[in-house]
Amino acid sequence: QVQLVESGGGLVQAGGSLRLSCTASGRTFSSYVMGWFRQAPGKEREFVATISSSGGNIYYADSVKGRFTISRDNAKNTVYLQMNSLKPEDTAVYYCAAEATANILMIYARPGEYDYWGQGTQVSVSS
């Protein structure tokens, strides 16, 4: 079992930056694939980025590629999402998710592939 707590959300102007953090409980963080998803009002939860347990495999949604960077620090049980050049359409509640894996290069891009979720953090981008 792992518990996830996100932080770092807020209100920012278009073109600005934010860094989200997601800290996990437990001693096996390095065995989890981590993902970031977002959900805007009235829309389905959508994939943003994922990183393998080793950090050696990363995948982004096309909508954020080149602007967002996912990273992890297994010593700190934390995954990050650096968001640059933010746009109003990035406004959403951002969730981190975790799924245990024995494959150090495995990544997942669908919400149903994750068993553990954080409570979410609001990101609002004004135009």
Image (cartoon, helix red, strand yellow):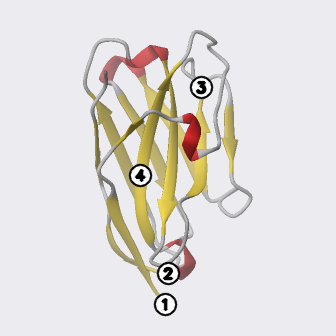
35 displayed left or right of 96: right
Numbered circle sitting on residue 109? none
How far, Cα to Cα, is label 3 from label 1?
A: 34 Å
| Rendered-image quadrant of the N terminus | top left
Residue drawn at x 69%, y 64% is 63
How far, Cα to Cα, is label 2 from label 3?
A: 30 Å
Three-letter amino acid code at the position of disc 1: Ser
Secondary structure at numbered mark 1: loop
Q: Position of residue 96 (x, y in %)?
A: 42, 44
Q: Nearer the viewer, mark 2 or mark 3?
A: 3
Q: Are marks 3 and 4 in contact (CB under 8 Å)?
A: no
Disc 2 residue crowd, few under 14, some 14–19, many 20+, Cα 10 Å: some
Q: Earlier in the sequence, mark 3 or mark 4?
A: 3
How far, Cα to Cα, is label 1 from label 2?
A: 5 Å
Secondary structure at numbered mark 4: strand
Q: Position of residue 58 (x, y in %)?
A: 66, 34
Three-letter amino acid code at the position of disc 2: Ala
Q: Position of residue 115 (x, y in %)?
A: 45, 33
Q: Position of residue 113 (x, y in %)?
A: 58, 35
26 displayed left or right of 96: left
Which residue is denoted by mark 3 in the rendering?
A: 52
Q: Is residue 48 above or below residue 9?
A: above
Which residue is denoted by mark 1 in the rendering?
A: 127
Secondary structure at numbered mark 2: loop
Q: Earlier in the sequence, mark 1 or mark 2?
A: 2
How far, Cα to Cα, is label 4 from label 1?
A: 23 Å
Three-letter amino acid code at the position of disc 4: Tyr
Q: Earlier in the sequence, mark 4 or mark 2?
A: 2
Secondary structure at numbered mark 3: loop
